[in-house]
Image (tube, rainbow, N blue to C red):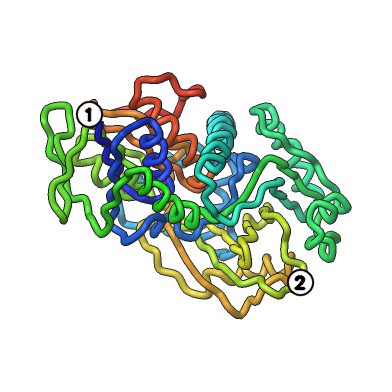
Amino acid sequence: MKALVLGAGIAGITTAYELNRDGYDVTVIDREDQPAAFTSYGNAGLFAPGHSYSWSSPAAPGILLRSLWRDDQALRFRPSIDPAFWRWMWKFWRECDAERAATSTRRKARLCNYSLDVFHETVKRTKVKYDGKDGGLLYLYRTPANFEAAVKKSQILIDSGIELETLDRAGIAKSDPALAPVADQLAGALFSPNDESGDCRMFARNMRPWLEKKGVSFKFGTTIERFDLAGDRIDAVITNQGRETADVYVLCLGVYAPHLAKQLGTTLNIYPVKGYSVTVPTAGRNNVPTRGGVDEENLVAYCPLGGRMRITATAEFSGYNTDHSPADYRHMLKMAKQLFPDAADYSELDYWAGLRPMTPAGTPLLGQARHDNLWYNTGLGHMGWTMSHATARITADLIAGKTPAIDLDGLLISG
């Protein structure tokens, strides 16, 4: 049977892998010229079940409102005239309830834990290179009050099967000697020993030749324009390069998935949330971090990637705009330099901004809606690298009529 995967970001690449593994003749199409050229291009690099908290927490509305006059907030609110923006924001606001946030966190933790298992199987089978680093991630807190609150809050993840350890300053310095010179700036940390890191873009692009050797076809520079329908089935995908047909279709188009789904009478509660990252060289520098982590009180993530370090921050609710300027990176660079003043050449800055396909609850949209040969694997949000391996395996199992390995409560799309 032939499968057509729409999108070559990390969700599309992992879906192609799982379908190929199940024996499908797979073709992947994407408008860019290579895999992981949009949302997956410059993400944080953290494979982080230990950071599965829902963004839609009771604290989120206040942070968003303060961002209207302060530029140091982890979440930024930039009002838009787009009606879809306000519809999505209203649904996000409704999710900012303690009980709903806890439910979303448990669902994300379950999915991310499973994804780590699938990821290990994939890497073992493919041996693909991605500047990977296992051994855990650090979640750092600067003040005793916030650290104490974080330890209490972490119980929901521990109860969901995620291993977390509490570290004092000495423990932080032992876990990553690069932080020893600045340990006095920190109150403590949560350490997730099973979390990992790696370059998502490198993984996706190195998977391409591996998949091609297994018979997967790629068609880049191909823009999807519309669907041809035959009753409750997709008959073909019409692109700027012609007509593509298959037995099954999988929509993995991130922030652009709602546009195509609308043609099919399906509403996807996905809206772009912009993230910023900067990559700096670390070769020849001192006190380079040995593992990735997050400065939790500033929500600035850092990740060593070979001879580079990636610094990531900010969730900006501002529509489809990917524009950025050096001013957007000022706060995150200031925080990174406080932690790792000698770790990188901060004069060589590779700026990037991308759009995360967020649902109001932060959980992905999987399964089928109105058409019996079209499946969705989209809305992976800010944890696409972490979730993608699970959502790809789940999608392949659903297509094959198998029962997925985990409970899909709250993860399945409705038409």
Please give the residue where the numbered disc 1 appears in the rendered image.
371
Mark 2 touches mark 1? (CB < 8 Å): no
Residue 371, above or below 217: above
Q: Where is residue 222 in the image (x, y as percent from the top left)?
A: 23, 55
Residue furthest bottom in the image: 347
What SS does tag 2 mark? Answer: loop
Q: Residue 109 carries which label?
A: none
In the picture provided, is 169 more to the left or to the right than 66?
A: right
In the picture provided, is 2 more to the left or to the right than 184?
A: left
Q: Position of residue 263 (x, y in %)?
A: 19, 41
Q: Which residue is drawn at 71% across and 75% down?
A: 284
Q: Which amino acid does label 2 sit on?
A: Asn
Q: To which quarter of the image does residue 149 belong?
A: top right
What SS does tag 1 mark? Answer: loop
Among the two numbered marks 2 and 1 on one chain, the one whose residue lies closer to the N terminus: 2
Q: Quadrant of the N terminus?
A: top left
Q: What residue type is labelled 1?
A: His
In this rendered view, identify the residue nearer to me: 193 or 380.
193
Q: Which residue is drawn at 13% across and 46% down?
A: 243
Residue 196, above or below 43: above
Q: Where is residue 378 in the image (x, y as percent from the top left)?
A: 38, 41
Please give the residue where the numbered disc 2 appears in the rendered image.
286
